[in-house]
Image (spheres, grey):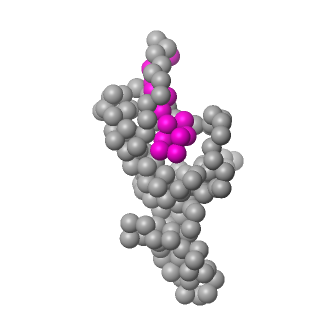
Amino acid sequence: MALHWKLIVDSKNAIAIADFWANALGYQVEDAGALIDQLVAAGQLPEEAVVEHGGRKYFRGFAAIRHPDDPYDPVSGIGKGRRILFQDVPEEKSVKNRLHIDVHAGDEGLEALVSRLESLGAKRVQKYDKGPAGHWWLMLDPEGNEFCAAG
């Protein structure tokens, strides 16, 4: 039996990096506003555990994105499919990622994809051309996490 999963990414600013990755992947930022309002009203969540950004409420230090075609819980906003959760941690990133995301160019082509990602705050690091194995750019997201943009 296949298991459900989500990718957890440690971050410095969960909300900002969730915005970047939602735009980069064409995903949706999860909206937990209804759940947050419900928990605050019931006295189960203190106001200081909530932060607002872009007219939306978030659990302080957490933000998630989900694939727009996957199912989600309408009350909590939590996706039930492809999902990435960003959580703030106190320590800085210190070494190369052991796991990374590959973003594949569609009809737009690799150069257009890389340019679009740069406009969102990513940085090009190194171009790789491995002949029949493909070509790609090693890039950094706005928090310095490595990922690849592939053609």
| Residue found at x 49% / y 52% | 17
| Residue found at x 59% / y 74% | 49
Q: Is residue 76 magenta?
A: no
Outermost residue, right side: 1
| Residue found at x 45% / y 71% | 52
Give the magenta-colored segment's residue range.
Answer: 133-146
| Quadrant position of the C terminus in the picture | top left
Q: Identify the image quadrant of residue 108.
A: top left
Q: Is residue 6 above or below residue 46?
A: above
| Residue found at x 63% / y 47% | 92
- Asked whether residue 101 is in view, the answer is no
Q: Identify the image quadrant of residue 39.
A: bottom right
Report x, y in % for residue 116.
Answer: 33, 38
- Asked whether residue 92 is in view, the answer is yes
Q: Nearer the viewer, residue 75 or 58?
A: 58
Report x, y in % for residue 138.
Answer: 49, 28
Left or right of 3 in this view: 103:
left
Report x, y in % for residue 6.
Answer: 60, 51
Left or right of 7 in this view: 108:
left
Report x, y in % for residue 98.
Answer: 66, 35
